Amino acid sequence: LAGRMWKPEGTVVRFANGVEVGGKEVVVMAGPCSVESREQIFTAAAQVKASGAKFLRGGAFKPRSSPYSFQGMGLEGLKLLREVGDATGLLIISEVMEISQIELMMPYVDVFQIGARNMQNFNLLREIGQVRKPTLLKRGIAATIEELLLSAEYILAGGNYDVMLCERGIRTFETYTRNTMDISAIPVIKTLSHLPMLGDPSHGVGRRDKVPPMARAAVAAGADGLLIEVHPNPDKAVSDGAQTLFPEQFEKLMEELRMIAPAV
Ligand code: PEP
Ligand code: MN
């Protein structure tokens, strides 16, 4: 169901406020890695909105490598996201980590994010296939393009057709960057699949100064959108600070992107 042979024209995921992902315009989803406080998320939302983002991202449930790292604000974080989304008109995207969180999150988010670590959590994918809410599926850390498309298939097979895919870097022998952003996956997937394809240069490289060039590269390669980490004060961020843009850097990047693609 994810293949172009099944559906030659590109899928456009439409939202109630008129925003479209997979349409003519590149759509940017930006915000902190984690929701940390009311002040932090309201400030971040105002900043990314001013620069032209259409979605606010922010994790309430965080898949941290260490069990001793901050695990997210949970329900309290979801409530803050909904409140700031309603106040600003930004759409909300946040990660769902397990089946039990689906129902809980339904009223609070506009898009479910399935993280790299859960790309092959087939039970979760099946359950997401049963709901009617757009979902962003991120490529696994060591997943092939075919495996990503097969994971999308699990969701589509349940009848949830609003699936967006995301390249977020894969693990290679290179250690200079956190992951290796596979830009080539973008045009390859755009050929193989009709689903909207996004790029996440933040997790893709893991280094703040390399995020703008990889964001520009992703858009130049045909990405329908970007997922970018932005924080009012990245050096104080509780997660992924090193790869998170300062609001001024994000503003400048958005201006650069507008020279590459229509109406970012
Ligand atoms: C995130 O978006 O903050 C995240 C945890 O992403 P990934 O699943 O790609 O590591
Ligand atoms: Mn992150």
Image (cartoon, grey):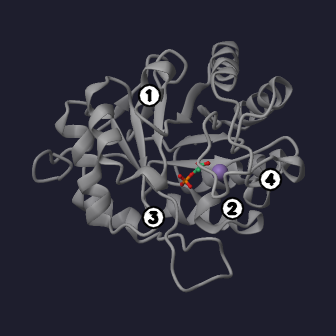
Residue at disc 2, secondary structure: helix
Q: Earlier in the sequence, mark 3 or mark 1?
A: 1
Q: Residue at x 70, y 49 (%)?
A: 255
Q: Position of residue 173 (x, y in %)?
A: 54, 86
Amino acid of disc 2 = Pro
Q: Quadrant of residue 140?
A: bottom left
Q: Nearer the viewer, residue 120 or 5?
A: 120
Q: Is mark 4 within 8 Å of ligand 2?
A: no
- Where residue 221 is drawn, which disc sits there? 3
Q: Is residue 126 above or below residue 181?
A: above
Would you name the residue on which mark 1 appears?
100
Amino acid of disc 3 = Ala
Q: Residue at x 41, y 71 (%)?
A: 184
- Where residue 212 is drawn, which disc sits there? 2
Q: Is residue 243 above or below residue 170?
A: above
Q: Residue at x 43, y 20 (%)?
A: 103
Q: Does 39 sit left or right of 223 as displayed? A: right
Alpha carbon of mark 2 to alpha carbon of mark 4: how far?
8 Å
Alpha carbon of mark 4 to alpha carbon of mark 3: how far?
21 Å
Q: Is mark 2 within 8 Å of ligand 2?
A: no
Marks 4 and 1: CB-CB under 8 Å?
Answer: no
Residue at disc 4, secondary structure: helix
Alpha carbon of mark 3 to alpha carbon of mark 1: how far?
37 Å
**Within 10 Å of the Cα at label 2, are there few (<14), some (14-19), or many (20+) other Cα atoms?**
many
Q: Earlier in the sequence, mark 3 or mark 2?
A: 2
Would you name the residue on which mark 4 appears?
249
Residue at disc 1, secondary structure: helix
- Where residue 132 is drawn, which disc sits there? none
Residue at disc 3, secondary structure: loop
Q: Is residue 239 above or below residue 51?
A: below
Q: Does 73 sit left or right of 148 as displayed? A: right
